[in-house]
């Protein structure tokens, strides 16, 4: 009888402890008091540093924070700073040949155009991805422009650099993708490469690396790559420089 009472007591104690857990009551291993903002900002930063990988959803307690960030002035400033560094590099670090072999690669989603309106309806990454639903949204060709990237895009065109768009979007979205890009102001790219059924058998990083290998083998020098996912900029061969735009809403690999 006494043993049974002890087991019941321990069970109640464990249940109470679990229900009382809160990030607001936690401390770091050095004893620092952690606020929810501290926790979520640290999570977001470590996503961008590529310390946190392969996450399926944004932590539930951080959904509101991530939503505020991707719709904030800070997000715009962070993105614009990335593009400014691209422009500095283009101006001072690129010995362009001007012979048709100079290339620059862009991703599309959350690089040239924004999926934030879609993810707003999905708790800014707090819900697991439904690819069919996302592709229906993409097929409507209503993604808004990321204007800071358009500025770099147009500078590259003016310098005679071939612009290659490599996206994880599937080939069936080609018409909608072109329509969306053109209607927000992008035109004059050299090539738009989307995933074929054969490419879908590969991870995104491998698919994009294979595309870059074909470009390099064809004589291109890739001066730069801009993307919001590490899978867009990692793998061999890469560009002479790579630039990562912020995106804490999802992880593609």
Image (spheres, rainbow, N blue to C red):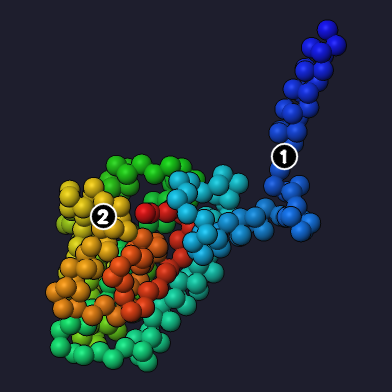
Q: Quadrant of residue 178?
A: bottom left
Mark 1 closeness class: few <14, some 14–19, many ≥20 residues within 10 Å: few
Quarter in which the C terminus is drawn: bottom left
Element at badge 1?
Answer: loop
Taking the image as shown, residue 99 lies to the left or right of residue 29, namely left
Front residue (pair 71, 43) = 43
| Residue at x 36%, y 78% (from the top left corner) | 241
Query: Is residue 125 among what the camera can see?
Result: no
| Residue at x 42%, y 56% (from the top left corner) | 116
The disc label shown at residue 169, or none: 2
Q: Position of residue 161 (x, y in %)?
A: 22, 82
Q: Position of residue 18 (x, y in %)?
A: 71, 33
Taking the image as shown, residue 28 lies to the left or right of residue 139, namely right
Q: Using the image, determine if residue 131 lies above or below residue 161.
A: above
Query: Mark 1 touching mark 2, by CB under 8 A?
Result: no
| Residue at x 74%, y 28% (from the top left corner) | 14
Which residue is the extreme one toward the right? Answer: 2
Front residue (pair 91, 183) = 91
Q: Quadrant of residue 107?
A: bottom left
| Residue at x 77%, y 17% (from the top left corner) | 8
Q: Earlier in the sequence, mark 1 or mark 2?
A: 1
Q: Position of residue 141 (x, y in %)?
A: 26, 56
Query: Is residue 131 among what the camera can see?
Result: yes
The residue pinned by badge 1 equals 21
Element at badge 2?
Answer: strand
Quarter in which the N terminus is drawn: top right
Q: Position of residue 194 (x, y in %)?
A: 21, 58
Taking the image as shown, residue 240 lies to the left or right of residue 180, namely right
C-alpha distance separating marks 1 and 2: 41 Å
């Amino acid at each position: 009888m006494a043993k049974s009472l002890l087991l019941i007591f321990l069970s109640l104690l464990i249940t109470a402890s679990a229900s009382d857990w809160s990030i607001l009551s936690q401390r770091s291993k050095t004893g620092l008091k952690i606020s929810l903002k501290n926790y979520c900002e640290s999570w977001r930063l470590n996503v961008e540093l590529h310390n946190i990988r392969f996450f399926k959803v944004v932590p539930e307690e951080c959904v509101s924070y991530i939503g505020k960030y991707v719709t904030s002035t800070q997000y715009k400033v962070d993105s614009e700073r990335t593009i400014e560094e691209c422009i500095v590099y283009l101006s001072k670090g690129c010995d362009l040949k001007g012979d048709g072999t100079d290339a620059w690669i862009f991703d599309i989603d959350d690089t040239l155009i924004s999926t934030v309106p879609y993810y707003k309806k999905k708790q800014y990454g707090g819900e697991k991805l439904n690819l069919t639903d996302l592709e229906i949204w993409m097929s409507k060709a209503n993604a808004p422009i990321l204007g800071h990237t358009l500025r770099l895009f147009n500078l590259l065109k003016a310098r005679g650099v071939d612009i290659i768009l490599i996206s994880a979007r599937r080939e069936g979205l080609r018409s909608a993708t072109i329509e969306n890009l053109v209607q927000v102001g992008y035109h004059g790219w050299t090539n738009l490469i989307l995933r074929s059924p054969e490419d879908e058998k590969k991870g995104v990083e491998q698919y994009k690396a294979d595309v870059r290998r074909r470009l390099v083998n064809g004589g291109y020098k890739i001066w730069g790559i801009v993307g919001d996912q590490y899978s867009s900029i990692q793998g061999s061969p890469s560009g002479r420089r790579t630039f990562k735009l912020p995106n804490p809403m999802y992880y593609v690999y």
